[in-house]
Image: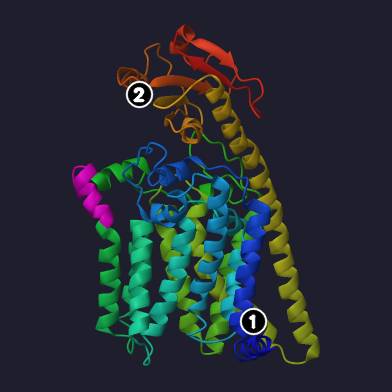
Amino acid sequence: MGSRASMHSWLRADPWRALLMLVAVCYGIVQLVAAGPGMGLGWDEVVYVSQVDPRVPATEFIAPRARGITLIVAPVTLVTSSTDALRVYLCLLSALALYASFGTWLRLRPGAVAPLAALLFASLWLALFYGNEAMPNMWVAFGAVAAVGFFLRCVRPDGGRGSLAGLALCVAAVALLRPPDSIWLILPLGLALAKPGWRRPRVAIALVAGLAVGWADWIVEAYVRFGGLISRWQAAGAANETGLHFSLYEHARALNGPLLCRPPADCGPAVPSWVLWWSAIPVLVLLGTYAARRRDHLAESLMPAVAGVSLAAPYVFLVGYAAPRFLLPTYALLAFPIAHGALGLLEGARGSAPRRAGACLVAAGFLAHLTLQGATLDKVVAPRLAKRGADVQVARALEGLSVRPPCLVYGEHAVKIAYRMGCEGHTVLNWPGQSDVPAAVRGAEAAGKQVIAVDRGGSVPAPFLLAWERRPLRDVRPGRWSAYLPR
């Protein structure tokens, strides 16, 4: 009875934190039901997870990648290779991160803004799909939300050392996950310190300290593995096709579910319903900022909006392709001004009739949003469950052909298949047209490793495989998979 009474008193004393906790719990549950256990690892996930899985060879770790996500998955991956265990762990951890990151704003100003912003962000199909994926963008989003919240607490007259430490820690976390993103995060925060009344040297020191700590690992590895910082930076730029670009249309094409809009992938045209949803965001952000200004909350709407736009800028203007996950931090931050606008519409109307009209408008908009997100999530998850399930089936079939480590799997989906077998993998997006045996295959054979090639097209994919023994994998679906073994 005493614990129940204390819980009731806590709910009465801090209802907004309880509401945020409810949003986080629902977020975790929906992930587990819709996109949790059963989903195999994607290519990028295998790269990150294999770095800390002692049971498999580490997949090639190219210059643009950073080690932050490997630290997140390490507690589970060091113990087990179970993908289901990893998915459940990441579901729980992302729900906790949602609560913690948006919860920093409740200490800035209690109210419904933080829970509503968390709900808006957590209901995105992207947030539900990537919450339990071993990918860095979702965690950058959480770090960016918390960093901006801590920053606004630091520039207040009562900002304490705890807020400074939180700010530095969040910037360091973002830099450890995706180093370039941390620069675009602190850029608007640093410029905001020029505002009269916000000039606090210790906040600038916290930003720089967090940046230095987060970048340290990437810089050290640049000298250890990539020939120096400049060499790694150039290699990362070449891998990510960085330069002057304008990829806004590619991002519009990726809104409805393609996970990557980069050749040879075909993303199709932009979907009108999604373009309408996307076009509404800047309008809602402007209206929300206006509503926040009327309520004397301008900084709490404007700062996340500016930081969100800053984080989107490099992916729109400096990267030559698109992936919807790139904009996750932007969506997370823009949820705050949109939440201000929704609450302004609900609270600003005078009289029962206008208030009911405002409530109906907000409810209708949110229902349309949920419908679009739910339909897209189902469209994204269902085929990937089947495709990643096929990778597991291929791995079992190859083990049935007595393929054992040390080994190299070469061909389509090879990295994902090889991870299941404890082999090295070399994925082929476009099969080589020449008849010469590829260098990766020659190197593996010279090292005494068993080599096998896999293809899901059903015909001989490359001339050099004509001399190999073909074994159709008839029970693997979807696709018409074949394995090729050197004679």
Q: Residues within 10 Å of mark 1 (few under 14, many from 20)?
A: many
The C terminus - image quarter: top left
Is 312 displayed left or right of 271 in the figure? left
What amino acid type is highlighted by mark number 2?
A: Ala
Per the rendering, the mark at residue 440 is: 2
Residue located at (53% from left, 62% from top): 94
Vertical comparison of 353 with 261: above or below? below
Q: Residues within 10 Å of mark 2 (few under 14, many from 20)?
A: some
Q: Secondary structure at mark 2?
A: helix
Residue 430 at x, y percent in the picture:
47, 25
Residue on which disc 1 sits: 343
Q: Nearer the viewer, residue 314 or 76?
A: 76
- Of the residues under marks 1 and 2, which one precedes in the sequence? 1
Q: In this view of the protein, can residue 424 be seen by the observer?
A: yes
**Looking at the rendering, which quadrant does residue 278 occupy?**
bottom right
Residue located farthest toward the right when viewing the structure as drawn: 353
Distance from the alpha carbon under mark 1 to that under mark 2: 58 Å
Question: Which label sits in the foreground, 1 or 2?
Answer: 2
**Looking at the rendering, which quadrant does residue 368 occupy?**
bottom right
Residue 84 is inside the magenta segment: no
Residue located at (51% from left, 22% from top): 454
Q: Secondary structure at mark 1?
A: helix
Residue 442 at x, y percent in the picture:
33, 18
Per the rendering, the mark at residue 215 is: none
The N terminus - image quarter: bottom right
What amino acid type is highlighted by mark number 1?
A: Leu
Which span is picked out in magenta? 217-231
**Looking at the rendering, which quadrant does residue 471 occupy?**
top right
Residue 317 at x, y percent in the picture:
41, 53
Vertical comparison of 64 with 293: above or below? above
Residue 225 is inside the magenta segment: yes
Q: In this view of the protein, can residue 286 be seen by the observer?
A: no
